[in-house]
Every structure is written in structure tokens, then in C-alpha cells.
Image: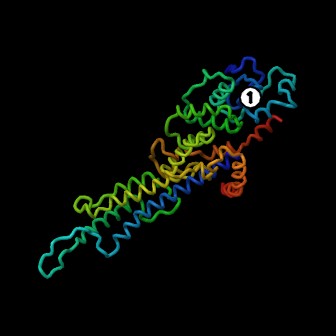
Amino acid sequence: MNPTKEIDPHGDVIAILPTTSTKFRVSSIVLSLASPVLRAMLFRGGVTLASAKALRLVEVEFPDGSPQALEAIFNVLHFRHDCVGANASYDILYEIALVVDKYDLKAVRPWGEVWLRGAGGGGGGKRLFATYVFGDREGFRKECQRAILQSHGYDCGLNGGSEKGKETEVEEENDWDSNLVPTRVLGKIYTSPSDATCNYS
Amino acid sequence: MLLAIIANLVLELISEARISAIRSLLAVVEYFTDLYCNRDIKCRIYLPSPGPRAPRCVAIPGCDAGILGSLVTLHTTIGMRPAPQPPYKGFSVQNLALAIKGQRSSADQAHQECSIAEPVVRQVDEVLAQVDRLDIWNSCWGESAEDSHEEEKRWRHGTEFKFAFLRDRT
């Protein structure tokens, strides 16, 4: 059994990830300062959800977040910068970007630059997505150009899963299509922040 | 939801730019093929006339044929037989550009003056330069979008129709 990771030992919120046993203890004040979406989730009538329900701790679900992504984000928001790694894989970086975008976490943006730099080249659509979310205009331009030059035109983004495997057997490891933002990503980002808020109203 | 709009718009712009670049690269090959299908002799090497009554110089038609042959071979190598159609699945701009630039004919060694390698490379590089100049961020949000909330609002409003169109397709 995974113990609750105490990002803030005095926090009043237990962040639950329904798909894993991972839990994080965090501060509602910190989260609400960092994100208008989380503020709407965690505050009712000017008081924290815990206070409103007369509870010491309130559990809040983060249905889409991966444990590594949420841990990195919570550490950044709670000023635990020494606990944040500068090197994140594209998968993690992409999961972080999804959460940052969903909850409008602009406070994490400076770390985006560090993670993008640490992740190196490649990454295809995941990197493209992250450069957009973290506002890296030059990185975004380069990734778009890479996509134009390297894509083999297999439809991954708009109409379903990748067709690439059906038609070609061998492609470069970092081929753009193999990393293109797939439909499942679009599905995730269709879940708007307002949907997330509704879960707690 | 906004990100979904952006994702669709960006993918659409990338796809359009890719198709346009591939179309331009294929057009380069077609241009030179058409040029060498023409009956006019392009060879620039002239031989001394064999006799006093013969014309002073004659070109070597076999040189043109060699270049045309290499272009026809290139058609097969890059998958232009039969002519591909958009969205050119299986083609990448990068690989296509490399294949076209790597095209070689007998003229490259025997008749260097006749070689089309240099003009072909120049035209391919021009297509690649157009891709390099492309700024999809600008196409989506405009130059001052980062600083202007109003610009973003206008962009959001302007893409609603396009998004609806894309959403219907998915």
C-alpha cells in the first residue's frame, strides 16, 4: 500500500488518483492561488472545502493526472524545487502539460522551460504539445517544421488511431508520426476545466 | 476545449503545409521530366563537324536521353509511378527532398555542363526554405497574440466555425 506523500505535512487536501493508490497531501491555499480551476474546486463561499464540511482533511480526485506528473507539479507549487527533477521523459512532460493546461497552472510555466531543455530533441507531437502549453514559441515553431518535414501523413490526430503500423513496418524511432498527439490526447483535452470543476460541485 | 481547437487547427495547418511541400517537390521532378521529354536538344556539348558540308557542330542527343532516363528512374524510386495523390501517405518531405537531391545521371560525370543536379538541388532547397519560413504560431495567433488578450479573443471567435467543421469530421 502506498503511503500518502506529504507534499505539505500541514495540508488540508488529499489528492487522490482514482487509477492508482498514490495520494498526495497538499495545501488548498497553495492550489487555489496557482489555479482558478482548483480554486473553484476547493473553495465554497470563501472558505476551503475542508472548513465548509467541518473536516480536517478533504479528499479531491484528480482523475486524469499521472502520479509522476502531479507529484512534479505539486512540488513546484509548494516551493519544493529541490524535489523536482530537471529531466523528464516526453511521456511525463506531456502528462505534466496536460495537467497544466487543464487546470490553467501558469505558475508551473518557468519549469516548463527547464523540462523542455532537459528532454532534448525528438518527442514529436508530445513535445509540440508541451511547447504550446509552456508558451515556448520558438520550440513550437521548430516542432511544427519537424512535423512538416518528417510526417508520413498517417492520420493520428483527427480521425482515430495511428494508421502507420498498418502500412509500414519499419520507421525511425523518433519518426514524427509515432509521437504525434493521438486521438486519445485530444479526448483528454476535450475534458475542459469546467468539467473537472463540476465533479466537485 | 480551447486546446482541442488549437490541436485540431495546428494539425490541420501542419498537414496542409506538408501536402503543399510534397506537391512542390513532385512538381520539381515533373518540370525537369517535361523539359527532357521535349524534342529540343538540351545538351550543351558540341562535337567538331565530321566534314566540310556538315553543320559546324552537333549536340549529342544521347545525353538528353540519359538525363531523361535518370528522371524516369527517379519517378519509380520516389513513388511517382503511378502519380501519388494527396495526402501522400507514406511520403515525407524530408525523405522526398533527399531522394530528389540525390538524383544522378550519366551527364553528371560525362557532360558536367549538361548536369541538372545543381538546378534540381536549388529548386528543392527553395521548397525547404519555404517550410523553414513558415510560422504556424503566427498563423494561429498572430504576431502580437501573446501580448493581446483581444487578439486571442478574436482568434477564438474566428476559429469556432473551423473547429465545428473539424469536430464534425471526427
Protein image colouring:
rainbow
The answer to whether residue B38 is above or below residue B100 is: below
Q: Position of residue B39 (x, y in %)?
A: 32, 76
Q: Nearer the viewer, residue B112 or B144?
A: B144
Q: What is the chain identity of the residue bearing mark 1?
A: A
Looking at the image, which residue sits at the far bottom?
B53
Density class for disc 1 (Cα within 10 Å; few <14, some 14-19, many ≥20) is many
Q: Position of residue B170 (x, y in %)?
A: 66, 54
Q: Quadrant of residue A72?
A: top right
Q: Nearer the viewer, residue A20 or A63?
A: A63
Q: Is residue B15 visible?
A: yes
Residue at 67% across, 33% down? A65
Is A30 on the left-hand or right-hand side of B128? right
Looking at the image, which residue sits at the far left?
B51
To which residue does mark 1 refer? A31
Is B38 on the left-hand or right-hand side of A64? left
Q: Position of residue A94 (x, y in %)?
A: 60, 37
Q: Position of residue B91 (x, y in %)?
A: 47, 55
Residue at 75% across, 20% down? A11
Is B52 on the left-hand or right-hand side of A92? left
The residue type indicated by label 1 comes to Leu
Q: Is residue A1 visible?
A: no
